[in-house]
Image (cartoon, rainbow, N blue to C red):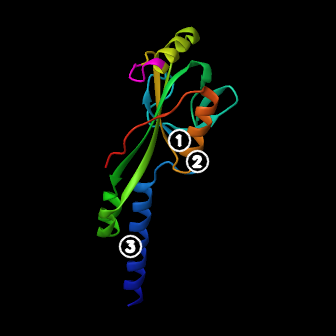
């Protein structure tokens, strides 16, 4: 009888551990580089997104750090994307199928030529539908950090972050 109880406790513990590992997103105030035109940083690289004095910096655990000076930023988008907790529901409990997890994405458009960046900022100010050219970097940011990151970026760049509609 005790052996069956031990097996049951071990099985439940293993299932919960696997579900937590599968569901682990961006934690510990870390960010993930989702994609873009940054060279030297792999998609899916986890690291810190830092809003420094003069630049937005991404520091992955391995590889080179990357800075985007605020004077080169031409536009920014923020969006939440909701998804189902399928893996947790399969391993733990079916009611989790009815809950949503939200992921927070920040996309930064920038131009390495500061004169062109300034020109594009002026065009965006006149026409909000103007599409900037140059480079782009998209990050998944921690749910605890997104509001602060957006506020700081708006203050330091002088630009408004364009909010994308929430998708379910």
How many residues crowd mark 1 within 10 Å: few (<14), some (14–19), many (20+)? many
**CA gap, disc 1 and disc 3:** 32 Å
Q: Nearer the viewer, mark 2 or mark 3?
A: 2
Q: Which residue is mark 3?
A: 11
Quadrant in which residue 5 is drawn: bottom left
Q: Main secondary structure of the magenta part?
A: loop
Q: Position of residue 31 (x, y in %)?
A: 53, 41
Residue 98 in view in this figure: yes
Which tag is nearer the camera, tag 1 or tag 3?
1
The residue closer to the viewer here, 15 or 161, is 161
Q: Name the residue located 58 percent from the left edge and 33 percent from the top edge.
A: 154
Badge 2 is on which residue? 29
Question: Which residue corresponds to the image point at 35% horizontal and 68% vertical from the top-left?
Answer: 92
Mark drawn on residue 31 = 1
Q: Among all residues in the image, which is located at the extreme right?
A: 53
Question: Mark 2 or mark 3: which comes first in sequence?
Answer: 3
- Look at the numbered disc 1 and give the secondary structure of its residue: strand
Which stretch is magenta?
126-131
Tell me the CA gap for discs 2 and 1.
7 Å
Q: Secondary structure at mark 2?
A: loop
Whole-percent x, y for residue 119 in the image: 52, 11
């Amino acid at each position: 009888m005790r052996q069956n109880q031990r097996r049951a406790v071990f099985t439940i513990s293993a299932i919960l551990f696997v579900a937590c590992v599968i569901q682990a997103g961006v934690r510990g105030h870390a960010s993930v580089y989702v994609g873009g035109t940054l060279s030297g940083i792999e998609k899916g690289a986890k690291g810190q997104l830092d809003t420094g004095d003069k630049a937005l910096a991404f520091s992955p655990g391995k590889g080179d750090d990357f800075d985007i000076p605020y004077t080169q930023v031409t536009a920014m988008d923020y969006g939440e994307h909701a998804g189902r907790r399928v893996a947790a529901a399969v391993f733990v409990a079916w009611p989790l199928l009815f809950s949503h997890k939200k992921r927070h994405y920040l996309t930064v458009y920038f131009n390495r030529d500061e004169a062109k960046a300034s020109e594009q900022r002026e065009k965006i100010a006149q026409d909000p539908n103007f599409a900037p050219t140059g480079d782009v970097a998209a990050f998944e940011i921690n749910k605890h950090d997104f509001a602060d990151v957006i506020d700081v970026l708006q203050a330091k760049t002088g630009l408004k972050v364009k909010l994308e509609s929430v998708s379910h």
